Image (cartoon, coloured by chain):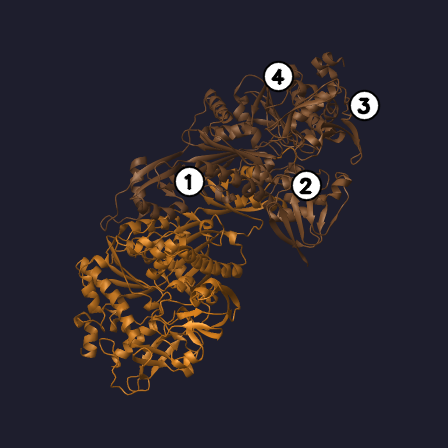
Chain colours: A brown, B orange
Amino acid sequence: MEKCTVIFQPTGKTVEVARGTNLMEAARKAGVFLDAPCAGKGHCGKCRIKIKSGKHKHEYTPLLAAEEIEQGIRLACLTWIQDDMTIEIMEVDIINDIMVEDITSASKGKLAKRTLDILSASEIEVGTGFTTVTLTLPKPTIDDNIPDFERVKRELKQVLGCEKISCFIEVLKKLPAILRKNDNEITLMLSKNDSGYDIINVADKKEAKPFGLCVDIGTTTVAACLVDIQTGEIKASANSGNLQMQYGADVISRIIYSTKDDGLKKLQQAIVEGTLNQLINKMICKLGISKDDIVFSVFAGNTTMTHLLLGVPAENIRIEPYIPAFRNAPVFRAGDILLGINKNAPVFTLPNVASYVGGDIVAGVLASGIWKGDETVLFMDLGTNGEIVLGNREWMLTCACSAGPAFEGGEISSGMRASSGAIDEVKINKYDLKPRISVIGEVKPKGICGSGIIDAIAEMFLTGIIDMKGKINKAIKSDRIRYNHNIGCYEYVIVFGGETEDGRDITLNEIDIDNFLRAKGAVYSGARTLLNNVGMSAAEIDRVIIAGGIGQNLDIKNSITIGLLPDIPHDKFEFIGNSSLAGAYACIISDEARQKAAEIADNMTYIELSADSAYMEEFISACFLPHTDTTLFPSLKKAMNL
Amino acid sequence: MEKCTVIFQPTGKTVEVARGTNLMEAARKAGVFLDAPCAGKGHCGKCRIKIKSGKHKHEYTPLLAAEEIEQGIRLACLTWIQDDMTIEIMEVDIINDIMVEDITSASKGKLAKRTLDILSASEIEVGTGFTTVTLTLPKPTIDDNIPDFERVKRELKQVLGCEKISCFIEVLKKLPAILRKNDNEITLMLSKNDSGYDIINVADKKEAKPFGLCVDIGTTTVAACLVDIQTGEIKASANSGNLQMQYGADVISRIIYSTKDDGLKKLQQAIVEGTLNQLINKMICKLGISKDDIVFSVFAGNTTMTHLLLGVPAENIRIEPYIPAFRNAPVFRAGDILLGINKNAPVFTLPNVASYVGGDIVAGVLASGIWKGDETVLFMDLGTNGEIVLGNREWMLTCACSAGPAFEGGEISSGMRASSGAIDEVKINKYDLKPRISVIGEVKPKGICGSGIIDAIAEMFLTGIIDMKGKINKAIKSDRIRYNHNIGCYEYVIVFGGETEDGRDITLNEIDIDNFLRAKGAVYSGARTLLNNVGMSAAEIDRVIIAGGIGQNLDIKNSITIGLLPDIPHDKFEFIGNSSLAGAYACIISDEARQKAAEIADNMTYIELSADSAYMEEFISACFLPHTDTTLFPSLKKAMNL
């Protein structure tokens, strides 16, 4: 078998593969991240690379223009290596894109404060079994020659008034040197168990503290915080893309990938080593602490993400009768999943409700306080999937809509996550059809994120660029409206290449709009189905809480206009931000919150939409702008004279 | 830095090292075992290799004859690599020397039976928290779609009548496939904990059983058994050398090696991966079970061996005030030490008494029943170290003698372990001074083991070949008595090269004898010191129990003759075999035995011989044949007219 060497620029990562290997496979093997929402099937066009040299075969794709082919641009998933090659990666390596936020930032203070308020209002006690003790031991002599560990226990028993003290092997390994290094003064981090205490870490510094790691594992985005367990203060936070994206944008493609040889292992590595350990390293470097000081961890993710985090087969999630491997995973140890914190730190995963409603939603419900109020709340998590909860302290219904990744920019030709360079607001002038945009960060636009797409579609609808079906009005004469021969449909140009970061036009085409309408239709019809299940109308909802990646810059009016949100008074809507992270944070600082999370998961009734006969009809009606039944959108009907 | 390639024949293992590297170091790096009781200091002569080709430097040693040098024979530790080399390994690779015994063998039945008798006589309950349950679960449907783990728990709760059921991550990973493979029939291995049960393994076969591994980790020899935990039956046993031997024969050399870079790690690897995992693999292959079926493990070893097994720094054991890192190690998991059994199997190590009296002695005391009888027993473990216990149910004293490895053939030029090819009995004809020997196995003799050396020295003494000081009578004319110019002393030839396995003479020289007299002197004077501590004479001892590698073929009369054992009636002596392994076995089959072991360790009073002012005098007197005070050996005095 002939071997070819492939070099990926600008990092210079190099890999040796057999002749004929697919370039996407080679990139994965080299540890080079390429975005691949379609999991390498050749239809999303996100894995564009530039060939600097080397013989190769490639398959024709309408996603590349002739001049791009000319310049050496290819889709990695449609390219096969024939000889030694040098490749230029054009997209930013997602994992270098980690943002470690300043610990004084308002958003974190807000997340902590809001969560503490909810816990306090719910009479959930804040407090954990983690504590530190600093001891100065008597120096050993020939007459008092008891071993190091027994010497520590002798002293600890007096301090704690407890007989049963154990430790982990790493502690026993470190103990002799630390005792002798620091004149028998040591700081112990202790974790309470059923019958006594475990020594989970030992340090020679008095100021050593136990930290907790809380993480929201989104299908697209991962957000993490390091928390001082004793004070509850958030000391650092960071977020990045989920490196599993190279194996597909949505949970279904990842589950399919997980059934391939080594697929499950690769997906677990992508989230743990590729994503989480990178985030953790950045945060511990910033705080100047040791990874052994992180003695607890809590993860909120959807059912699939939680399975893949733990390396547990997820394939039955998508096979009828849709059986996950677990609802409440036991508390494992960080070393079990090679997580880069203290090997013995407990790993608590928020419980799942069902195959497609996971611990992230349970965390969101916990953090938003729905479960303890009298108000009937509609909770919508608009991330890669769309999960919905309807209920109050008496009852809670939940369902999952197959919204796909559109809300986070997936399956949209110019789509991207809500990070630097993303257009997050769009306003179209109804006379000249020119858009006014706002971009995240002080950079040229690179793409458009969820909230920007909602604005654009609403404005295109209101200005008559598109009709109820999302089809572009060909009669309009504008340089921004044109036929795209490559993909065979019309498109609207939001920003011309001359003003973008990479020189490519930022557009929304009819396929993009159709994808987005199906996403919003899935969510809206899911909410309708839950309401129908309890015989309620939208007007009877007391409050709508919106969470998820799409959140902060979402325009309520536009979201109603496109038929994503129900047409009820705007003051009933509330953005809660990353409620999954907030719920995970609650579980770090409160043992009682973790118990409450299990109760919440048990008390939620899951509605399987695919088994609900009325859902498909609801869905089809909801894939229009705003809906086939315009009486559901009275304010819009009036404004537009529908 | 110039690199040289070194090939070790006959295995062909190859390693690349820097020019100038010591050949012993290169062998270790290549994973080639060379015996090195002196830890590579050039004075034991055990690391003989033959150079087939390649430039090298070597240091002169009297341990090699001129004709051996001529033939290319070198000591690896005194050879430095100058170019690419090919080396022939002449000694058997110790780890290929694993003996897996037949499960029906009498000795194992005896070990099990004797231990069960002791436990029963002591009213110690046999029984553990391990059990198996076979379940057939209802098939999941869209209406009964609870997850796999919760489905198992629902059924288990009914069987066990217990609410708290947890599992390890490996079980959760295996569960979905096993359930679906076998039509929802599964066998679970359960381990009871403080509040409920842990599922420690899951299998698709009904006949899957939980096994326990019990091991005696000797400094020189490692012996292991696999036990059916539920019936207590020993299903396989195996033994081999301790691969740590390449880093020195005694605990002191190993502790010193452990303080070098990576030394501790290498020593841990040598025992766990190099020795234990090999023994385990041989046994599981024989039984046709999975390593995951071994769900519990118990280790008995001296204090240093236990530290090195766990990878815990041992250096303070040999530095005044001699503080081990622990006495009672917490119960760790097999995965913590990379032991090749079920990763979550508890690892129980028998507690230490002091720096030089470890869990092997506690196991021996447990298995021999000293702690529960009225008789005053002298317990002697004659392994690489000599540990002694004196006592009964009321009190127990213990001490450790620096006997070195002589009882297991170490530091004796023709010495070897009591395995195939070892001379284990010697009788010398007083007229022609020709020896009659017995050899283990049906092979030509290769060397001489402990019991053989005792016989030989006793017979040489009785026949007048050596005097009280162990010096050879030069006046005797015999082709078996000659001066060895290489080492500069006289020697007695037991077998001439023409009749040995490797063509080399098997001899005992004055240095060997001196080494052995110091070993026996250390043990005898240790026993005397314990007796003196309680004001007892040897005659007052009710019973002498002899354990350890030297055991089975030890001749009592000869042992008294050389002054190793006290001169009391022969019927007071009892061989107990490997009592350390027997104690470990007791701990596998009985939870109560493990508690008893901790109590035994707590109740033993350790006498530090180096701090005992009278000991040195006792020792010097005991290094003669049989002793300077011949009144201590009345029977011998009478017989020999001393």
Residue that label 4 marks: A541
Which circle, 4 or 3, is nearer the viewer?
Answer: 3
| Pointer 4 chain | A
- Residue B194 is marked as 1
Task: Determine if marks 4 and 3 fall on one subunit.
Answer: yes
Which circle, 3 or 1, is nearer the viewer?
Answer: 3
Q: Is residue B180 above or below residue B40?
A: above
The quadrant of the rendering that contains the C terminus of chain B is bottom left
User: Is B427 or A33 nearer to us in this picture?
Assistant: A33
The outermost residue toward the front is: A498
Inspect this view and state whether residue A97 appears: yes
Which circle, 1 or 4, is nearer the viewer?
Answer: 4
**CA separation in Å, label 1 and label 4:** 47 Å
Task: Determine if marks 2 and 3 fall on one subunit.
Answer: yes
**CA separation in Å, label 2 and label 1:** 53 Å
Q: Position of residue B501 (x, y in %)?
A: 44, 78
Residue that label 2 marks: A47
Circle 1: is it few (<14), some (14-19), or many (20+) Cα within 10 Å? Answer: few
Which element carries disc 1, helix, strand or loop?
loop
Which element carries disc 4, helix, strand or loop?
loop
Which of the 4 quarters of the picture holds residue B633?
bottom left
Amino acid carrying mark 1 in the image: Asp
Which circle, 2 or 1, is nearer the viewer?
Answer: 2
- Are the residues at dot 1 and dot 4 in contact (C-beta closer than 8 Å)? no
Residue that label 3 marks: A477
Circle 3: is it few (<14), some (14-19), or many (20+) Cα within 10 Å? Answer: few
| Pointer 1 chain | B
Q: Position of residue B79 (x, y in %)?
A: 42, 70
Amino acid carrying mark 4 in the image: Ile
User: Is B468 or A419 nearer to us in this picture?
Assistant: A419
Residue at 23% x, 74% y is: B625
Which element carries disc 2, helix, strand or loop?
loop
